[in-house]
Structure formats: structure tokens, C-alpha cells
């Protein structure tokens, strides 16, 4: 009788935490930038579609500051239980470490990669007065005028700046860098002809290209983009293997259980394979990615090392 009572009590008791299916409560995804920026927009497109597949609400937690360090640190210090995730960008994980970003984490070891969510290249544009209609012609113009051809950027150390440095290094040319405080003033001055060229995200320059106030020569991704399929890549136009994109990945704290990684990765890949997400991201000049956690780790390492080399070669100074 006592045995029967004990078995009944066991069957009626709640399952231990380890036996409960994941996830069994809402998830928090930290975006280490303020609301309204590219990372936040892509994160919300993604998490809105991921939530139904995981069967739980996903709360986007914007924690901007220190170039993304504050938000990333928050997740690095969070429990590795699958309920605290980081929507990281290449600026946080690949570029900032080489520019003196002080952080209480290691970008290559403090986070568990889950999936590459997507990426968005820059567009190489020139003022109409520049006598170049192809990337090869632009390189020829730059070689004929070493140090005189100026390019605008969104600011020192930004992807638009580093893309220009990568282009100059790969093409064997010398360009004059002119930093601005954001994409808008950089675009305005390029349209005015005060600088000759600009590497910028498509949403920043698309209207100027369509109105012929700027001439687009190529995109900096390895594949052409859906919103402007007529534009060749820099790689196919002149510089084989050239790639520079803002990318986003989903990570957890180091030590995230493999079962959790696999569960979220599988659901994320289903989202990223849909036409719905492709159309949503295309409006911002971006494209969904997907793939395995190992593929994200490899891509991250390659991108991290590329920008470290570019920054060191160009002698770009670290942030104070």
C-alpha cells in the first residue's frame, strides 16, 4: 500500500527542471544598440518569426552603449540556460576588439555561436563627375591620382571606413579618407561632389542612385543583392574574393548546452529559409543567412582576423 502511494505521488509531482522541454518560458534577446537601428530592425524581423517556432515569447532587450560592449557583457555574464541570448553584429564581434574596445569578455571564446542570421553589404558609389563606370575604371583613376581621390565614411573605425581601407589595400591604390558623423552627412557631401566616392549601406544611398545623383558601381558582398540585382560584386568586377558586409549572428553565453543550441538553430534555419524573411530583409538591403553553429564560428573568426589585419596595416588608431 505504501509503495502504491509513493508511486502515485511521484507521478503527480511536477517534472524536475532538467526534464522539462526547452523552452518552457519566454526568452530575452539582447540587441546591444538602441532601438531603430539596423541591428534592432533585423532582430525584430527575425525574433517575431522565431517566437512561434519555439512556442514562447521573445523579448528584445535594447542595451546600447560603448559600441555594443554593454549589451554583449550583459549576455556574457548571464546564465547559460538558453533564455538569455545576444543578437550581435560584426561591429561588436569583429571590428571593435581591434579598435581598443574595453570589455570583460573575449569575443571569440565568451559566446556560444548559434546561427548567422543575415548580412548587408555596402554599395560602392561615386559622384557622377568621377570618370569611372566600372570598378576597374575606378581603380585606374585612383592609380593615376594617388592620394587625391577622397572617399567619405560614416566615421573613423566604422564599416564604411574599413571597407574603403580594404578596397585600397586590395586594389593597390591610395585613397584619402574623409570621416563624417554618420551616413546622412557622408552621403550629402558625396552627392555635392565634395568627396568622390562612398561605401554605404544601400538604404543610405538607394534614392540617390535611382535619381542619378550618385553612380553605383558594385556591392561589397560575395553575392549580388536582391534589391539591386543589376549591380555586380566587387569580387566579380575586379578584386577576387573581396567581401565586406555588416552581419548579424545569434549567440548565447559560453557553455550553452548543445541541445539548446541545436533546438534554436533548427528553428532559426526554418525562419531564415522562408520567402517572408527574405523579402523583409531585402527592403533594408540585407539577406538572410542560416547555417550551422560551426559555420558561424568559422565565419566570425575569418571576419575578425580580416579586420584586424586591415586596421593594423592602415595604422588606424584605437579608440581612446
Image (spheres, grey):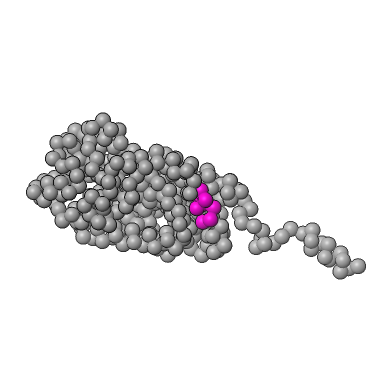
Residue 181 higher or lower than 147, as above or below: above
242 sits to left or right of 78 = left
What segment carries the magenta color?
A: 265-271
239 sits to left or right of 22 = left
Residue 283 higher or lower than 21, as above or below: above
Residue 209 higher or lower than 167, as above or below: above
- Is residue 216 in the magenta section? no
Residue 89 higher or lower than 262, as above or below: above
Residue 106 at x, y = what percent?
Answer: 40, 62
Residue 211 at x, y = what percent?
Answer: 26, 30
Residue 14 appears in the picture as rendered: yes
Residue 280 at x, y = what percent?
Answer: 44, 40
Residue at 82 percent of width and 65 percent of height? 7
Residue at 34 percent of width and 61 percent of height? 302
Residue at 43 percent of width and 48 percent of height? 288
Residue furthest out toward the left = 144
Residue 74 appears in the picture as rendered: no
Residue furthest out toward the right = 1
Residue 239 at x, y = what percent?
Answer: 22, 54
Q: What is the quadrant of the N terminus in the image?
A: bottom right
Q: Main secondary structure of the magenta part?
A: helix
Quadrant in the picture for residue 3: bottom right
Q: Nearer the viewer, residue 194 or 201?
A: 201
Amino acid at each position: 500500500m505504501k509503495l502504491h502511494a509513493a508511486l502515485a505521488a511521484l507521478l503527480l509531482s511536477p517534472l524536475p527542471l532538467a526534464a522539462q522541454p526547452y523552452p518552457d518560458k519566454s526568452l530575452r534577446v539582447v540587441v546591444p544598440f538602441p532601438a531603430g537601428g539596423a541591428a534592432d530592425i533585423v532582430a525584430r524581423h527575425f525574433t517575431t518569426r522565431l517566437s512561434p517556432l519555439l512556442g514562447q515569447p521573445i523579448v528584445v532587450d535594447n542595451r546600447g552603449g560603448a559600441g555594443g560592449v554593454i549589451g554583449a557583457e550583459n549576455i556574457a555574464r548571464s546564465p547559460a540556460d538558453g533564455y538569455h541570448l545576444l543578437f550581435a553584429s560584426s561591429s561588436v564581434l569583429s571590428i571593435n576588439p581591434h579598435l581598443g574596445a574595453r570589455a570583460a569578455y573575449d569575443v571569440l571564446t565568451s559566446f556560444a555561436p548559434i546561427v548567422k542570421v543575415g548580412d548587408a553589404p555596402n554599395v560602392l558609389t561615386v559622384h557622377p563627375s568621377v570618370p569611372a563606370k566600372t570598378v576597374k575604371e575606378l581603380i585606374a583613376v585612383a592609380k593615376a591620382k594617388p592620394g587625391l581621390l577622397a572617399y567619405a565614411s560614416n566615421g573613423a573605425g566604422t564599416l564604411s571606413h574599413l571597407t574603403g581601407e580594404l578596397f585600397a589595400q586590395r586594389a593597390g591604390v591610395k585613397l584619402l579618407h574623409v570621416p563624417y558623423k554618420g551616413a546622412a552627412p557622408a552621403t550629402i557631401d558625396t552627392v555635392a561632389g565634395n568627396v568622390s566616392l562612398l561605401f554605404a549601406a544601400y538604404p543610405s544611398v538607394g534614392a540617390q542612385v535611382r535619381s542619378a545623383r550618385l553612380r553605383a558601381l558594385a556591392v561589397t558582398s560575395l553575392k549580388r543583392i536582391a534589391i539591386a540585382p543589376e549591380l555586380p560584386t566587387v569580387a566579380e568586377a575586379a578584386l577576387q574574393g573581396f567581401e565586406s558586409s555588416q552581419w548579424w549572428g545569434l549567440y548565447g553565453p559560453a557553455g550553452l548546452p548543445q541541445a539548446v543550441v541545436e533546438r534554436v538553430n533548427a528553428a532559426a534555419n526554418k525562419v531564415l529559409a522562408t520567402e517572408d524573411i527574405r523579402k523583409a530583409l531585402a527592403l533594408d538591403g540585407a539577406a538572410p543567412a542560416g547555417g550551422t553553429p560551426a559555420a558561424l564560428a568559422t565565419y566570425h573568426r575569418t571576419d575578425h582576423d580580416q579586420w584586424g589585419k586591415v586596421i593594423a596595416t592602415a595604422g588606424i588608431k584605437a579608440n581612446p
